[in-house]
């Protein structure tokens, strides 16, 4: 059950495969919210799951992410944030529910998509001096794109194949009805 949130607080998860631009778009959404005077916080969920080793059966340390997110989201909401913008990956409906429960406010999920050759170019640029990391990300991008196509955990989809980051961020805000 979601708690009584300050001034109708809401959360938006920007979901998608690696290299699609989740964090970059989340930051741009945050910039637009700041320009509009809307109290908010932007969180990259990857940082909340980073610890080693991940427990057996929790490949991407999702339970640690949830533990950390409960505290952090509560702190931001208590401080007056009315919008939480999250960048991360969920692969199952159950993960969506758990994430929403951890945040404690209504959660909308945006799936950022792009054509895989474009994502692969972005990843090659990002990991140009790390051949092993590049290969893992290339493999994971295709795997995750297939998973997200099947599970349909999103409320809406925005294509990032073309267009500027700011245009994509505006499209995300409009589709989330956060105008």
Image (cartoon, rainbow, N blue to C red):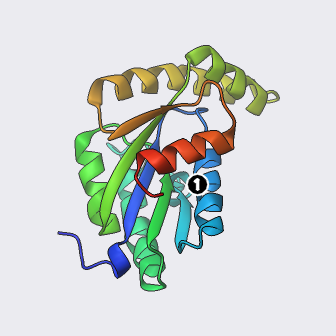
Residue 52 relative to residue 105: left or right: right
Q: Nearer the viewer, residue 152 or 175?
A: 175
| Secondary structure state at the residue bearing disc 1 | helix
Judged from this view, the residue extending furthest toward the left is 1
Question: In the rendered image, which residue does mark 1 sit on?
Answer: 29
Q: Quadrant of residue 133?
A: top right
Q: Residue 129 location, x and y as percent?
A: 82, 29
Q: Quadrant of residue 131?
A: top right
39 relative to 87, above or below:
below
93 relative to 6, above or below:
above
Q: Residue 149 location, x and y as percent?
A: 35, 23
Question: Residue at the spot x=54%, y=68% of the render?
Answer: 41
Residue 7 relative to residue 39: left or right: left
Question: Residue at the spot x=37%, y=71% of the render?
Answer: 9
Crowding at dot 1, Cα within 10 Å, few <14 / some 14-19 / many 20+, comes out as many
Can residue 110 be seen at all in this image of the molecule?
Answer: yes
Question: Residue at the spot x=54%, y=55% of the render?
Answer: 50
Residue 76 relative to residue 99: left or right: right
Q: Residue 169 location, x and y as percent?
A: 58, 46
Judged from this view, the residue extending furthest toward the top is 117
Residue 30 relative to residue 153: left or right: right
Q: Quadrant of the N terminus?
A: bottom left
Question: Residue at the spot x=51%, y=26% of the render?
Answer: 140
163 relative to 80, above or below:
above
Q: Residue 144 location, x and y as percent?
A: 44, 27
């Amino acid at each position: 059950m979601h708690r009584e949130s300050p001034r109708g607080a809401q959360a938006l998860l920007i979901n998608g495969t690696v290299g699609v631009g989740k964090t970059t778009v989340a930051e741009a959404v945050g910039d637009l919210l700041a320009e509009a005077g809307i109290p908010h916080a932007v969180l990259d969920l990857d940082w909340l799951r980073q610890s080693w080793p991940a427990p057996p059966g929790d490949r991407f340390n999702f339970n640690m992410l949830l533990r950390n997110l409960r505290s952090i989201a509560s702190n931001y909401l208590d401080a007056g944030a009315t919008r939480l913008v999250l960048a991360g990956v969920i692969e199952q409906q159950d993960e969506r529910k758990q994430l929403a429960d951890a945040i404690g406010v209504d959660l909308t999920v945006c799936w950022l998509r792009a054509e895989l050759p474009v994502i692969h170019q972005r990843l090659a640029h990002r990991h140009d001096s790390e051949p092993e990391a590049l290969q893992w990300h290339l493999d994971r991008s295709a795997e995750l794109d297939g998973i997200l196509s099947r599970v349909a955990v999103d409320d809406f989809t925005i294509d990032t194949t073309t267009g500027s980051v700011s245009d994509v961020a505006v499209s995300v805000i409009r589709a989330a009805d956060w105008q």
